[in-house]
Image (cartoon, grey):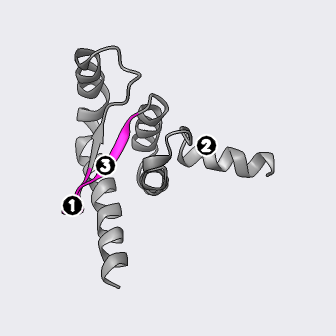
Amino acid sequence: MSYSSEKEKRKYDPRRDLVQDSKLWQMVLRTAETYDRETYGTLHGFRCYGCRLVLTKNGKIIMKPGNEWSSIKEWEENRKEYLIPLADKIKTVFSTVEKFLKEKRVG
């Protein structure tokens, strides 16, 4: 594998060791990058820190903290400082991916 393809993989999922949600992160980060650079960077940073994405049974994406946060309080503080200000943009990114996944299942 060449350096550029490895760099490309890290760009869309910097935590490839967390395989369970890697494909979902790749879709989310690719979408975020085309939508808004700040949103992409923030989501990328949270993934670096081990955040998980879960696709619920009704097709919604939710974000959960990884084990890297020392406490729920630290997670909540980071969430409030970095994610909440971008909530509308993050919702748009998630809903775009959710719609794609729903269409892919139906079609």
Q: Quadrant of the C terminus?
A: bottom left
Q: Could you tell me residue 43's position as x and y percent?
A: 41, 39
Residue type (three-letter) at the residue carrying disc 3? Val
Q: Residue furthest left?
A: 58
Label 1: how many Cα within 10 Å (few below 14, some 14–19, many 20+): few
Tag 1 and tag 3, C-beta contact below 8 Å? no
**Residue at mark 2:** 10
Q: Residue furthest front?
A: 20
Tell me the mark number nearer the camera, choosing from 2 and 3.
3
Q: Could you tell me residue 12's position as x and y percent?
A: 54, 48
Q: CA distance from mark 1 to mark 3?
A: 10 Å
Q: CA distance from mark 2 to mark 3?
A: 20 Å
Q: Earlier in the sequence, mark 2 or mark 3?
A: 2
Residue type (three-letter) at the residue carrying disc 1? Lys
**Residue at mark 3:** 54
What span is colored magenta in the figure? Answer: 51-61
| Location of residue 67 with respect to 87 vertically, above or below | above
3 displayed left or right of 105: right
Please, what secondary structure does the residue beneath circle 1 have? loop
Query: Quarter of the image holding residue 86?
Result: top left
Q: Earlier in the sequence, mark 1 or mark 2?
A: 2
**Residue at mark 1:** 57
Please, what secondary structure does the residue beneath circle 2 have? helix
Q: Nearer the viewer, residue 31 or 13?
A: 13
Tag 1 and tag 2, C-beta contact below 8 Å? no
Question: Is residue 65 within the magenta segment?
Answer: no
Residue type (three-letter) at the residue carrying disc 2? Arg
Tell me the mark number nearer the camera, choosing from 1 and 2.
1
Q: CA distance from mark 1 to mark 2?
A: 28 Å
Label 3: how many Cα within 10 Å (few below 14, some 14–19, many 20+): some
